[in-house]
Amino acid sequence: MKYGVNEHGYYGDFGGAYVPEMLYPNVEELRQQYLKIINEPDFKAEFDLLLKDYVGRPSPLYFAKRYSEKYGANIFLKREDLNHTGSHKINNAIGQILLAQRLGKKRIIAETGAGQHGVATATVCALKGIECVVYMGEVDMERQAPNVSRMKMLGAKVVPACSGSKTLKDATNEALRDWIANPVDTHYIIGSVVGPYPYPDMVARFQSIISFEAKKQLFEHTGKELPEYVMACVGGGSNAMGMFYHFLDDESVKLIAVEAAGKGVNSGHSAATTFLGREGVLHGSRTILMQTDDGQVVEPYSISAGLDYPGIGPQHAHLYKVNRAQYTSVTDDEALQAGLLCCQLEGIIPAIESAHALAQLEKMKFKKDDNVIICLSGRGDKDLDTYIKYFNY
Ligand SMILES: *Cc1c(COP(=O)(O)O)cnc(C)c1O
């Protein structure tokens, strides 16, 4: 694949595995094993069966008729919101738990910000009867209390990260510390296409089911496999990578990645990484991240917890730099309005993350016959409070 990872773990200038020496054996074990394991027929069969019967795949490619009339093109929504646990994150969590089992691991750890990845991880650990520890910033535990309860009901231990800003990056540090202390029996499930190689490639492969299905489904709808546009929101970038994956080499397909502008790209409260960021190292890989002149990571902001991340995965940094995909951003207000419009036009309450991708429609000019696929990465149940406060329902 032209845009895929090379044998050294890089996408052009980005990627690699920048980890402390004490983590090297863990990451090296994964690097040596992951492709071999995920290509075994037995792995594939179990992964496919769980995606079908447990997650509910294939997720529909829904032709959104009223959107299509409004925007003057054929708009299709890839319905990851209908997956078990409410988003695309379960695809990756299942892939990694099956891998961990085959590596002989007895214990799973994860970090979580909003709790969505923590819930997906706790879910698959319950399914497999494996011990699960989720690290979460103390501040996030307060902000996302229902997800903390969900994880506990599912049998996970939720450990508060009490250092620094008590949010996602502190939880990540705690998880890494745990992994260093427990290298033999523990697997660390990272929730997006970020982190040291091989994680970005591994997670992209697990999420690539999204575009694998979408290609076939678009053909069933239109007689064509290739749309004109494929769009998705980007936090770390896993739903977007999954949605882009099988279209990457088809250069006629325009790929559009939508970041969170927060209160505006120049407001000081934003997560628009490609606009505000520079090249550097974040969470184990060389990528683009928001940083100060002396290289301190800038605290990001977005109303949507899933997009509130100061970097993007290294493959996105590469697609941005070589201009294969276009990166734009949408503000909190634009996203919330787009979320409400989706409710009223299509009867679907989208996650606020996904609403960022929908908001981008307002800024596009389509031709009448254009086929457009948007990844609806998750459902909005978790965001009801935010919607209610904003619109005064
Ligand atoms: C976590 C999350 C995201 C952002 O993560 P990516 O890795 O960028 O996909 C987007 N949408 C939903 C619904 C999420 O839960």
Image (spheres, rainbow, N blue to C red):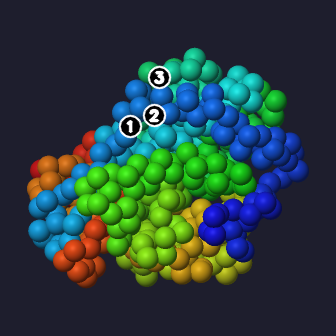
Spatial distance from mark 2 to mark 1, Cα to Cα?
6 Å
Which residue carries the number 1 mark?
57
Question: Residue 12: in sight, yes or no?
Answer: yes
**Mark 1 Cα-neighbour bin, 10 Å: few <14, some 14–19, many ≥20:** many
Amino acid of disc 2: Leu
The residue labelled by disc 2 is 51
Q: Does the residue tagged 1 have its C-beta within 8 Å of any atom of ligand 1?
A: no
Instruction: State the separation of the CA atoms marked 2 and 3.
Output: 19 Å
Residue at image x 71%, y 28%? 102
Q: Toward the viewer: 350 or 146?
A: 350
Upstream in sequence: badge 2 or badge 3: 2
What is the CA distance from the residue labelled 3 to the residue labelled 1? 22 Å
Q: Dot 1 lies on which element?
A: loop
Q: Nearer the viewer, mark 3 or mark 1?
A: 1
Q: Is residue 155 left or right of residue 288?
A: left
In the displayed structure, 78 sits above or below 330; it is above
The residue positioned 22% from the left and 74% from the top of the image is 369
Picture disc at residue 154 = 3
Q: Nearer the viewer, mark 2 or mark 3?
A: 2
Residue 128, horizontal then vertical, whole percent = 56, 20
